[in-house]
Image (spheres, rainbow, N blue to C red):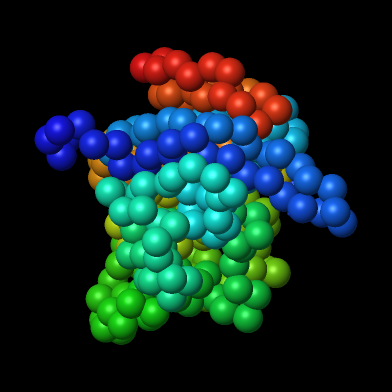
Amino acid sequence: MNAVEMPLIKLVNVSKIYNSNGIAVNALKNISIGIAPGEYTVIAGPSGSGKTTMLNLIGTLDTCSGGEILIDNQDVSRKTSKELAEFRLHKMGFVFQAYNLIPVLTAMENIEFAMMLKKISEKIRHEKAMHIMDELGIADLAKKRPNEMSGGQQQRVAVARAIVNDPLIVLADEPTANLDSKTGDSLLNLMEQMNEEKGITFLFSSHDKQVMDRAKRLVILKDGMITEDNILR
Ligand code: ADP
Ligand code: MG
Protein backbone atom coordinates (compact mmCIF):
# COMPACT_ATOMS: atom_id res chain seq x y z
CA MET A 1 0.00 0.00 0.00
CA ASN A 2 1.46 3.38 -0.83
CA ALA A 3 1.64 6.25 1.62
CA VAL A 4 -1.15 8.24 -0.03
CA GLU A 5 -3.66 5.48 0.65
CA MET A 6 -2.75 5.19 4.32
CA PRO A 7 -5.27 6.80 6.61
CA LEU A 8 -3.90 9.39 8.99
CA ILE A 9 -6.23 8.13 11.72
CA LYS A 10 -7.11 4.47 11.87
CA LEU A 11 -9.27 2.71 14.45
CA VAL A 12 -9.60 -1.07 14.27
CA ASN A 13 -12.25 -2.75 16.45
CA VAL A 14 -11.85 -0.15 19.15
CA SER A 15 -13.84 -0.50 22.33
CA LYS A 16 -13.94 1.58 25.48
CA ILE A 17 -15.38 0.40 28.75
CA TYR A 18 -15.53 2.81 31.67
CA ASN A 19 -15.85 1.52 35.19
CA SER A 20 -17.75 3.84 37.43
CA ASN A 21 -18.38 2.56 40.94
CA GLY A 22 -18.25 -1.04 39.81
CA ILE A 23 -20.66 -0.48 36.92
CA ALA A 24 -19.21 -1.08 33.45
CA VAL A 25 -20.25 1.42 30.77
CA ASN A 26 -19.62 0.23 27.24
CA ALA A 27 -19.02 3.63 25.64
CA LEU A 28 -17.57 2.39 22.33
CA LYS A 29 -18.31 -1.00 20.81
CA ASN A 30 -15.88 -2.34 18.20
CA ILE A 31 -15.51 0.81 16.17
CA SER A 32 -13.48 0.76 12.97
CA ILE A 33 -12.83 3.80 10.80
CA GLY A 34 -10.09 5.31 8.67
CA ILE A 35 -9.67 9.05 8.16
CA ALA A 36 -7.43 10.28 5.36
CA PRO A 37 -5.16 13.32 5.55
CA GLY A 38 -7.04 16.56 4.82
CA GLU A 39 -10.51 15.27 5.67
CA TYR A 40 -13.01 17.50 7.45
CA THR A 41 -15.15 15.16 9.50
CA VAL A 42 -17.95 15.67 12.00
CA ILE A 43 -18.86 12.94 14.45
CA ALA A 44 -22.48 13.47 15.37
CA GLY A 45 -24.94 11.60 17.52
CA PRO A 46 -27.04 12.10 20.62
CA SER A 47 -25.62 12.96 23.98
CA GLY A 48 -23.98 9.89 25.53
CA SER A 49 -23.36 8.18 22.18
CA GLY A 50 -19.57 8.17 22.64
CA LYS A 51 -18.39 11.23 20.68
CA THR A 52 -16.13 12.68 23.37
CA THR A 53 -14.80 9.23 24.19
CA MET A 54 -13.84 8.72 20.56
CA LEU A 55 -12.08 12.11 20.34
CA ASN A 56 -10.26 11.50 23.62
CA LEU A 57 -8.95 8.17 22.32
CA ILE A 58 -7.86 9.65 18.99
CA GLY A 59 -6.26 12.56 20.84
CA THR A 60 -4.34 10.01 22.96
CA LEU A 61 -5.77 11.60 26.10
CA ASP A 62 -7.24 8.26 27.14
CA THR A 63 -6.56 4.62 26.24
CA CYS A 64 -8.92 2.12 24.65
CA SER A 65 -10.07 -1.12 26.32
CA GLY A 66 -9.66 -3.17 23.15
CA GLY A 67 -8.63 -2.80 19.53
CA GLU A 68 -5.96 -0.74 17.88
CA ILE A 69 -5.46 2.98 17.21
CA LEU A 70 -2.94 4.16 14.66
CA ILE A 71 -2.22 7.85 14.21
CA ASP A 72 0.13 8.82 11.41
CA ASN A 73 1.08 5.13 11.14
CA GLN A 74 2.05 4.87 14.78
CA ASP A 75 0.42 2.52 17.25
CA VAL A 76 -0.33 4.90 20.10
CA SER A 77 -0.92 2.09 22.62
CA ARG A 78 2.78 1.25 22.45
CA LYS A 79 3.90 4.67 23.57
CA THR A 80 4.75 5.80 27.08
CA SER A 81 2.92 8.80 28.49
CA LYS A 82 6.03 10.91 27.94
CA GLU A 83 6.21 9.85 24.29
CA LEU A 84 2.51 10.59 23.92
CA ALA A 85 2.92 14.10 25.31
CA GLU A 86 5.63 14.72 22.72
CA PHE A 87 3.46 13.14 20.01
CA ARG A 88 0.52 15.42 20.85
CA LEU A 89 2.73 18.48 21.00
CA HIS A 90 4.01 17.91 17.48
CA LYS A 91 1.00 16.44 15.71
CA MET A 92 -2.20 17.60 17.32
CA GLY A 93 -4.13 20.71 18.13
CA PHE A 94 -7.02 20.62 20.57
CA VAL A 95 -10.09 22.77 20.89
CA PHE A 96 -11.54 21.01 23.91
CA GLN A 97 -13.68 22.50 26.58
CA ALA A 98 -11.67 20.72 29.25
CA TYR A 99 -8.45 21.95 27.64
CA ASN A 100 -9.31 25.57 27.69
CA LEU A 101 -7.13 28.61 28.01
CA ILE A 102 -4.75 29.07 30.90
CA PRO A 103 -6.37 31.78 33.06
CA VAL A 104 -3.19 33.55 34.18
CA LEU A 105 -1.82 33.92 30.65
CA THR A 106 -2.80 36.50 28.04
CA ALA A 107 -4.24 35.44 24.68
CA MET A 108 -0.82 35.88 23.09
CA GLU A 109 0.89 33.83 25.80
CA ASN A 110 -1.73 31.10 25.54
CA ILE A 111 -1.14 30.90 21.79
CA GLU A 112 2.63 30.81 22.30
CA PHE A 113 2.52 28.23 25.06
CA ALA A 114 2.95 25.08 22.94
CA MET A 115 5.69 26.76 20.94
CA MET A 116 7.50 27.49 24.20
CA LEU A 117 7.31 23.80 25.07
CA LYS A 118 8.76 23.07 21.65
CA LYS A 119 11.60 25.52 22.44
CA ILE A 120 10.87 27.70 19.44
CA SER A 121 12.70 31.02 19.69
CA GLU A 122 10.87 34.04 21.08
CA LYS A 123 11.14 35.94 17.79
CA ILE A 124 9.54 33.15 15.73
CA ARG A 125 6.95 32.56 18.44
CA HIS A 126 5.85 36.18 18.40
CA GLU A 127 5.76 36.27 14.62
CA LYS A 128 3.67 33.12 14.36
CA ALA A 129 1.29 34.18 17.13
CA MET A 130 0.81 37.66 15.64
CA HIS A 131 0.24 36.22 12.19
CA ILE A 132 -2.40 33.75 13.33
CA MET A 133 -4.16 36.38 15.46
CA ASP A 134 -4.27 38.71 12.46
CA GLU A 135 -5.72 35.95 10.33
CA LEU A 136 -8.39 35.22 12.90
CA GLY A 137 -9.17 38.88 13.53
CA ILE A 138 -8.19 38.75 17.19
CA ALA A 139 -5.00 40.84 17.20
CA ASP A 140 -6.66 43.32 19.57
CA LEU A 141 -7.05 40.56 22.16
CA ALA A 142 -3.31 39.87 22.41
CA LYS A 143 -2.89 41.28 25.91
CA LYS A 144 -6.22 40.16 27.35
CA ARG A 145 -6.61 37.33 29.82
CA PRO A 146 -9.40 34.76 29.35
CA ASN A 147 -11.66 36.34 31.99
CA GLU A 148 -11.57 39.59 30.00
CA MET A 149 -12.87 37.92 26.85
CA SER A 150 -16.30 36.70 25.71
CA GLY A 151 -16.92 32.99 25.07
CA GLY A 152 -16.61 33.54 21.33
CA GLN A 153 -13.32 35.40 21.72
CA GLN A 154 -11.94 32.64 23.96
CA GLN A 155 -12.94 30.03 21.37
CA ARG A 156 -11.05 31.97 18.70
CA VAL A 157 -7.98 32.13 20.87
CA ALA A 158 -8.34 28.39 21.50
CA VAL A 159 -8.51 27.79 17.74
CA ALA A 160 -5.47 30.03 17.19
CA ARG A 161 -3.60 28.05 19.83
CA ALA A 162 -4.65 24.75 18.23
CA ILE A 163 -3.53 25.63 14.72
CA VAL A 164 -0.52 27.91 15.29
CA ASN A 165 1.88 24.96 15.32
CA ASP A 166 0.71 23.61 11.95
CA PRO A 167 -0.55 20.35 13.46
CA LEU A 168 -1.45 17.35 11.33
CA ILE A 169 -4.77 16.97 13.11
CA VAL A 170 -7.09 19.36 14.93
CA LEU A 171 -9.61 17.77 17.29
CA ALA A 172 -12.52 19.87 18.44
CA ASP A 173 -15.11 18.64 20.93
CA GLU A 174 -18.42 20.49 20.45
CA PRO A 175 -16.61 23.63 19.25
CA THR A 176 -19.76 25.72 18.87
CA ALA A 177 -21.53 24.58 22.02
CA ASN A 178 -21.22 27.89 23.88
CA LEU A 179 -21.46 30.21 20.90
CA ASP A 180 -24.33 32.10 19.29
CA SER A 181 -24.97 31.01 15.71
CA LYS A 182 -23.19 34.00 14.14
CA THR A 183 -19.99 33.47 16.14
CA GLY A 184 -20.27 29.73 15.55
CA ASP A 185 -20.53 30.34 11.84
CA SER A 186 -17.42 32.51 11.69
CA LEU A 187 -15.52 29.93 13.73
CA LEU A 188 -16.55 27.23 11.24
CA ASN A 189 -15.50 29.46 8.32
CA LEU A 190 -12.14 29.79 9.92
CA MET A 191 -11.61 26.09 10.43
CA GLU A 192 -12.78 25.27 6.94
CA GLN A 193 -10.35 27.84 5.57
CA MET A 194 -7.49 26.27 7.57
CA ASN A 195 -8.53 22.87 6.25
CA GLU A 196 -8.51 24.05 2.64
CA GLU A 197 -5.45 26.29 2.74
CA LYS A 198 -3.17 24.26 4.99
CA GLY A 199 -4.56 20.77 4.48
CA ILE A 200 -5.01 20.31 8.22
CA THR A 201 -7.22 17.33 9.05
CA PHE A 202 -10.17 18.37 11.20
CA LEU A 203 -12.25 16.10 13.37
CA PHE A 204 -15.16 17.54 15.32
CA SER A 205 -17.73 16.14 17.61
CA SER A 206 -21.02 17.94 17.60
CA HIS A 207 -24.74 17.47 17.73
CA ASP A 208 -25.24 21.02 16.47
CA LYS A 209 -27.07 21.09 13.12
CA GLN A 210 -25.03 24.11 12.06
CA VAL A 211 -21.83 22.06 12.34
CA MET A 212 -23.30 18.89 10.83
CA ASP A 213 -24.63 20.82 7.82
CA ARG A 214 -21.12 21.95 6.95
CA ALA A 215 -19.36 18.62 7.39
CA LYS A 216 -17.51 17.19 4.42
CA ARG A 217 -17.82 13.75 5.97
CA LEU A 218 -20.49 12.93 8.53
CA VAL A 219 -20.17 10.00 10.90
CA ILE A 220 -23.11 9.16 13.13
CA LEU A 221 -22.55 7.43 16.44
CA LYS A 222 -25.39 5.77 18.29
CA ASP A 223 -24.99 3.94 21.54
CA GLY A 224 -21.25 3.48 20.99
CA MET A 225 -21.52 2.25 17.40
CA ILE A 226 -21.08 3.87 14.00
CA THR A 227 -24.47 3.71 12.31
CA GLU A 228 -23.75 5.98 9.33
CA ASP A 229 -20.67 7.28 7.57
CA ASN A 230 -21.11 9.46 4.48
CA ILE A 231 -18.87 11.68 2.39
CA LEU A 232 -21.01 14.74 1.66
CA ARG A 233 -18.78 16.99 -0.42
P1 ADP B 1 -20.99 12.08 24.10
O1 ADP B 1 -19.75 12.89 24.00
O2 ADP B 1 -21.49 11.57 22.78
O3 ADP B 1 -22.07 12.78 24.86
P2 ADP B 1 -19.43 10.42 25.91
O4 ADP B 1 -18.30 9.89 25.13
O5 ADP B 1 -19.16 11.57 26.81
O6 ADP B 1 -20.64 10.74 24.91
O7 ADP B 1 -20.06 9.26 26.80
C1 ADP B 1 -20.39 7.97 26.30
C2 ADP B 1 -20.88 7.12 27.44
O8 ADP B 1 -19.82 6.88 28.37
C3 ADP B 1 -22.00 7.74 28.26
O9 ADP B 1 -22.86 6.70 28.68
C4 ADP B 1 -21.27 8.35 29.43
O10 ADP B 1 -22.11 8.43 30.56
C5 ADP B 1 -20.15 7.36 29.65
N1 ADP B 1 -18.93 7.99 30.21
C6 ADP B 1 -18.19 8.98 29.64
N2 ADP B 1 -17.12 9.28 30.39
C7 ADP B 1 -17.18 8.46 31.48
C8 ADP B 1 -16.34 8.27 32.63
N3 ADP B 1 -15.24 8.99 32.81
N4 ADP B 1 -16.74 7.35 33.53
C9 ADP B 1 -17.84 6.60 33.35
N5 ADP B 1 -18.66 6.71 32.28
C10 ADP B 1 -18.34 7.64 31.36
MG1 MG C 1 -19.38 14.89 24.54
Residue at 74% across, 33% down = 47
**Residue 153 in view here:** no
**Residue 117 in view here:** yes
Residue at 31% across, 82% down = 119
Q: Check the image and name the residue furthest to the left.
A: 2
Quadrant of image for the C terminus: top left
**Residue 9 vertical position relative to residue 34 in the rendered view, above or below:** below
Residue 231 image point, x, y percent: 40, 17
Q: Is residue 194 left or right of residue 211?
A: left
Residue at 85% across, 54% down = 22
Residue 188 image point, x, y percent: 49, 37
- Comparing 67 with 92, the one in front is 67
Quarter of the view holding residue 151: bottom right
- Comparing 199 with 84, the one in front is 84
Residue 160 image point, x, y percent: 44, 58
Residue at 26% across, 45% down = 198
- Comparing 8 with 188, the one in front is 8
Residue 117 image point, x, y percent: 39, 79
